[in-house]
Image (tube, helix red, strand yellow):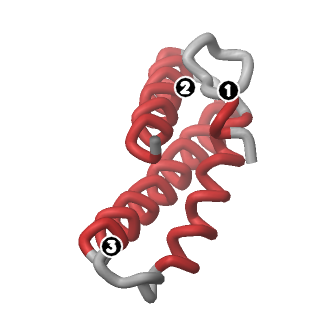
């Protein structure tokens, strides 16, 4: 499920970036482009922690679980921006 959520968000960010770059002549696109970059960094951090937690599943409660949980909640909140998209999954609702 986490992989689907990340893939969904990466696709939406790619769409946002493409739209913003097509309108790059406007100064107002610079901040939204930085937001796309920041959101991708959050997704990268989540994926890194997610991969580490998956490799530690033999533990009852991996030491990175708290970090994973916080990032997972943040990523779910990022996804709600696109809740009207047909590919949005209500299971991602925070």
Residue 42: x percent and y percent? 51, 59
Determine whether label 3 and label 1 are within 8 Å by CB: no
Circle 2 SS class: helix
Task: Report the residue that reaches farthest toward the top.
Answer: 86
Residue 66: x percent and y percent? 57, 79
Of the pair 77 and 1, the residue shown nearer to us: 1
Q: Quadrant of residue 84?
A: top right
Q: Is residue 48 left or right of residue 67?
A: left
Q: Is residue 43 above or below residue 62?
A: above
Query: Nearer the N terminus, badge 3 or badge 1?
Result: 3
**CA gap, disc 3 and disc 1:** 31 Å
Residue hosting label 1: 82
Q: Is residue 87 above or below residue 54?
A: above
Circle 3 SS class: loop
**CA gap, disc 2 and disc 3:** 35 Å
Of the pair 4 and 32, the residue shown nearer to us: 4
- What residue appears at the point 46 percent right and 53 percent down from the top-left corner? 43
Residue hosting label 3: 57
**CA gap, disc 2 and disc 1:** 11 Å
Query: Nearer the N terminus, badge 2 or badge 1?
Result: 2
Q: Nearer the viewer, mark 2 or mark 3?
A: 3
Circle 1 SS class: loop
Q: Is residue 92 left or right of residue 52?
A: right
Q: Nearer the viewer, mark 3 or mark 1?
A: 3
Q: Is residue 73 above or below residue 89?
A: below
Q: Is residue 56 left or right of residue 79?
A: left
- What residue appears at the point 48 percent right and 30 percent down from the top-left corner? 8
Q: Is residue 48 above or below residue 8?
A: below
Residue hosting label 2: 16
């Amino acid at each position: 499920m986490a992989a689907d959520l990340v893939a969904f968000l990466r696709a939406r960010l790619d769409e946002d970036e493409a739209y913003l770059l097509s309108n790059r002549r406007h100064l107002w696109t610079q901040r939204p482009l930085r937001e796309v970059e920041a959101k991708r960094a959050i997704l990268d951090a989540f994926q890194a922690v997610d991969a580490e937690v998956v490799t530690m599943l033999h533990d009852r409660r991996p030491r990175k679980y708290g970090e994973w949980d916080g990032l997972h909640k943040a990523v779910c909140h990022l996804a709600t921006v696109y809740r009207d998209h047909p590919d949005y999954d209500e299971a991602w609702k925070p």
